[in-house]
Image (cartoon, grey):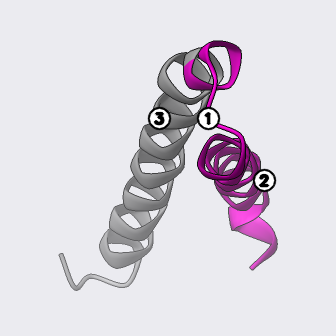
Amino acid sequence: MSELRSEAAAAIVAFAISLGYIIYPGPYVMGAFIFIAQPLFVVAAAGYAVKVLRELKRHGIF
């Protein structure tokens, strides 16, 4: 799990911004959601996918 620390942190920050947008919808929080939270979700998912593929290749599965 320590290998996914940065991906988990990115997802937590993105979820926090998303929750803020759900609770208090406004222009500034919407901007943070669009320009910060959504890219952070993509970064977290891409980082996770890269690490999973590396692990699968290391074990000779993929």
Graded by Cα atoms within 10 Å as few (under 14), some (14 to 19) or many (20 or more), the crowding at tag 3 reads some
Magenta-drawn stretch, dominant element (helix, strand or loop): helix
The dot on residue 9 is 2
Nearer the observer, 17 or 46: 17
Q: Amino acid at mark 2?
A: Ala
* Chain-order first, disc 1 or disc 2: 2
The dot on residue 48 is none
**To which residue does mark 1 refer?**
25
x%, y% of residue 26?
64, 24
Against 39, residue 21 (above or below) is: below
Residue 22 falls inside the magenta stretch = yes
The dot on residue 38 is 3
Q: Amino acid at mark 1?
A: Pro
x%, y% of residue 24?
71, 41
**Residue at 31 percent of width and 70 percent of height:** 57
Q: Is residue 39 left or right of residue 8?
A: left
* Chain-order first, disc 1 or disc 3: 1
Graded by Cα atoms within 10 Å as few (under 14), some (14 to 19) or many (20 or more), the crowding at tag 1 reads few
Dots 2 and 3: beta carbons under 8 Å? no
Against 49, residue 44 (above or below) is: above
Q: CA distance from mark 1 to mark 3?
A: 16 Å
x%, y% of residue 25?
62, 35
| Mark 1 vs mark 2: in front | 1
